[in-house]
């Protein structure tokens, strides 16, 4: 009972915060995934309509409309700083603005006259969109029988994807304009007419440019000649395709000019590399001389489009530097991310990954329970170890991502060498708890029993370090948002969010260690402490075995190397313990321990350099599955089949718990079959840049991530990180409806 009291006291502070978290987060995500905006839709009344992220209004270019003519109206957007909307081809994420009109009989809307978009680079992604003030002009056909002196009630629902660098929110706004009808030429509307006219004048249009395109070795070569390009000397050129999947949007575009035109070369997108070049490609060719719509037919390169020198793609040195920098974040966004990080860190104490560390802290807490000064010292040292390690890991992650590496949270466990080292370290800690050897016997005072041989301040700090490294595979509720946001914040804000996460992880132990009343309730020192210490060794043995299993999954048939290293390490530590127990006869044991340690290190180095195993573990999960790829998703959707995607990793304990509890039952398998759904598994056990990019696209920095795609819906539904059987079944049923 005393042992149970100890463990329950440890968890008491974290439990209240965890009780209602998964349901609330799941509800928010389900609402967003279903396309619901978090604010009420505005009524269809003239004038600007607003949400927290965008203001929009339907405005005219001219003061009135003339019967039998074409009037131009525009969707005026005023987008909050830090947010953006999208062009007709959104690029690597997001979605274009679409319009649903309700117009009087005989009034017909045309297509949006899209302004040239901004290139919005975000780490390894490239999007096309708009920020700040934007006008989307739309031509409106006015019937000849429109009665002068009256007004035409124009009504439209504008569907926006309003996104920041951390999340996307679908927003629907009902806009209205009562457009007067009069005879005679109409002047420009005094409020927005000149601005709309400028957008209309600058919008890309066809200009008699002939274009050809060819696909060779994964590279798309587009040649354009004639029209305004003949005899021109552009300094840069960039091709914006109308359709996604045509080019790798984030890849640099190279160019060359000639007397009759120019050539643009870029990496082909997934759609072309998978299916080949089947027909013409349309888009906007943007240069420093202007931007024009072109349609490039498949065929050999045109003549006169090269030989006069190379041209760039329009990203200046300043633009390129800004592209790799982290965008500005509003203070409320930072505060929200920091609070979510604190909650995520608290709940992280309840995740399976952290249980071995809780065993170590329980042993330490029991030793210092009746020495308040020592307990406070250990608590603060543990906090320092946690915060320092979060800073190191977060700094490394941010630095590597800034350098172009596609990494996510838990990246250290994607390295077999790190996993092997952690497995051996866990084994050493377990042997210490079992009493095979002792740390710090010469530094601890006598008379405190065998448990005094546990390390002091340095040991508490080290335990904090180990807690962070081992806890990384777990992603508690609220951590997904906090870490996803932190990876795109300015680095001071990002590090502050990571520190809040560390504070949440360490807070329960620190509060207990600083509270004399709680410490006084713990049992007094006695023989039970040594029994507890030996008992708590077994979670560490379990952690070592789990890491060895992960290592085996990451590598190709070299698990024996790690087992050999573990055996030699155990022998070295046993001999070291023998030398501690018999100081007068320690020479032979010490030499043996050194030799065994050298052998363990040698085998450990070989284990760390082991070749990778096949990355496809899709067959190892419980439901019949296929390996994830974007092409597999699109193929299934094209066949009218829903798709369930599981992004997982062998070192992610939460993932494995979900797979064993919610993705392996007969009811889930039956629901998958009834929905005629495809189950895809993205294995992130070892580094995979494609999976990293997909996680990033959905605002995540790590696994697990569960997506359910429904045919005919542009965006998937994101399921909670802590799955239940019912959540999966309901999502599959909804996708099949």
Image (cartoon, rainbow, N blue to C red):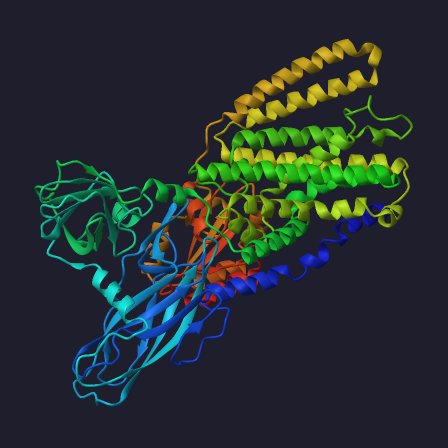
Q: Is residue 729 left or right of residue 542?
A: left
Q: Quadrant of residue 129?
A: bottom left
Observer-nearest residue: 47 or 476? 47
Nearer the observer, 323 or 710? 323
Residue 430 spot, x, y in % from top left: 72, 32
The residue shown at (54%, 64%) is 28
Observer able to see residue 527: yes
Q: Is residue 386 above or below residue 81?
A: above
Horizontal side of residue 313 vs 721, given as left or right: left
**Residue 429 in the image: above or below residue 320:** above
In the displayed structure image, the side of residue 72 where residue 600 appears, left or right: right
Q: Position of residue 142 (x, y in %)?
A: 20, 81
* Count of numbered tags: 0
Residue lying at 28% horizontally and 86% vertically, measured from the top left: 151
Up-down: is 400 above or below 519? above
Instruction: Specify whether 494 is left or right of 712.
Output: right
Where is residue 703? Give x, y as percent.
52, 48
Q: Between residues 616 and 23, which one lies in front from this camera angle?
A: 23
Visible in this render: residue 704? no
């Amino acid at each position: 009972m005393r042992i149970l009291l100890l463990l329950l006291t440890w968890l008491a502070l974290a439990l209240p915060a965890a009780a209602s978290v998964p349901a609330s987060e799941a509800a928010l995500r389900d609402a967003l995934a279903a396309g619901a905006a978090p604010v009420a839709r505005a009524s269809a009344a003239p004038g600007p309509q607003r949400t927290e992220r965008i203001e929009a209004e339907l405005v005219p270019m001219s003061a009135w409309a003339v019967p039998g003519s074409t009037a131009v109206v525009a969707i005026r957007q005023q987008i909050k700083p830090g947010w953006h909307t999208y062009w007709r081809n959104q690029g690597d994420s997001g979605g274009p603005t679409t319009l649903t009109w309700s117009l009087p009989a005989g009034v017909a809307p045309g297509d949006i006259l899209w302004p040239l978009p901004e290139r919005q680079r975000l780490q390894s992604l490239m999007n096309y969109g708009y920020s700040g003030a934007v006008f989307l002009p739309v031509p409106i056909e006015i019937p000849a029988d429109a009665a002068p002196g009256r007004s035409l009630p124009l009504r439209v629902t504008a569907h926006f994807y309003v996104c920041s660098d951390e999340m996307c929110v679908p927003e629907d706004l009902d806009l209205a304009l009562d457009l007067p009808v009069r005879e005679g030429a109409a002047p420009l509307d005094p409020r927005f007419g000149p601005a709309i006219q400028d957008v209309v004048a600058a919008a890309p249009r066809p200009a008699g440019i002939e274009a050809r395109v060819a696909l060779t070795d994964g590279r798309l070569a587009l040649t354009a000649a004639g029209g305004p390009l003949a005899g021109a000397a552009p300094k840069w050129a960039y091709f914006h395709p109308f359709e996604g999947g045509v080019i790798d949007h984030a890849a640099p575009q190279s160019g060359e000019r000639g007397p009759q035109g120019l050539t643009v070369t870029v990496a082909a997108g997934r759609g072309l590399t998978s299916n080949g070049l089947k027909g013409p490609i349309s888009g906007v060719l943007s240069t420093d001389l202007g931007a024009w719509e072109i349609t490039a037919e498949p065929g050999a390169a045109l003549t006169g489009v090269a030989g006069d020198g190379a041209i760039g793609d329009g990203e200046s040195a300043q633009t390129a530097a800004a592209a790799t920098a982290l965008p500005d974040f509003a203070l409320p966004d930072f505060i929200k991310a920091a609070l979510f990080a604190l909650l995520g860190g608290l709940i992280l104490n309840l995740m399976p990954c952290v249980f071995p560390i809780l065993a170590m802290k329980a042993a330490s807490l029991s030793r210092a329970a009746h020495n308040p000064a020592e307990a406070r010292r250990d608590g603060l040292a543990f906090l320092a170890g946690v915060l320092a390690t979060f800073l190191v890991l977060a700094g490394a992650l941010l630095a590597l991502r800034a350098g172009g590496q596609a990494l996510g949270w838990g990246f250290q466990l994607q390295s077999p060498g790190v996993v092997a080292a952690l497995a051996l370290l866990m084994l050493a800690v377990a042997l210490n708890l079992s009493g095979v050897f002792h740390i710090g016997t010469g530094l601890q005072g006598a008379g405190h029993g065998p448990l005094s041989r546990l390390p002091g301040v340095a040991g508490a700090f080290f335990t904090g370090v180990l807690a962070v490294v081992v806890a990384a595979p777990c992603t508690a509720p609220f951590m997904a948002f906090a870490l996803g946001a932190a990876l795109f914040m300015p680095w001071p804000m990002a590090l502050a969010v990571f520190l809040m996460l560390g504070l949440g992880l360490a807070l329960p132990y620190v509060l207990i260690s600083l509270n004399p009343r709680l410490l006084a309730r713990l049992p007094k020192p006695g023989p039970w402490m040594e029994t507890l210490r030996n008992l708590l060794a077994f979670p560490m043995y379990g952690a070592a075995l789990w890491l060895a299993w992960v290592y085996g999954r990451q590598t190709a048939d070299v698990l024996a190397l790690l087992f050999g290293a573990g055996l030699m390490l155990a022998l070295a530590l046993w001999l070291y313990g023998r030398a501690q127990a018999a100081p007068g006869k320690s020479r032979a044991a010490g030499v043996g321990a050194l030799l065994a340690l050298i052998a363990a290190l040698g085998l450990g180095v070989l284990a760390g350099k082991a070749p990778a195993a096949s990355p496809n573990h899709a067959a190892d999960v419980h439901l019949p599955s296929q390996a994830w790829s974007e092409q597999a998703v699109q193929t299934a959707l094209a066949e009218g089949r829903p798709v369930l995607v599981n992004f997982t990793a062998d070192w992610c304990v939460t993932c494995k718990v979900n797979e064993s509890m919610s993705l392996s039952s007969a009811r889930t398998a039956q629901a998958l079959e009834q929905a005629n759904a495809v189950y895809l598994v993205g294995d992130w056990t070892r580094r995979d840049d494609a999976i990293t990019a997909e996680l990033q696209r959905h605002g995540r920095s790590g696994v697990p991530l569960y997506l359910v795609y429904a045919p005919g819906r542009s965006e998937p539904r994101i399921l909670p990180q802590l799955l239940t059987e019912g959540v999966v079944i309901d999502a599959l049923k909804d996708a099949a409806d």
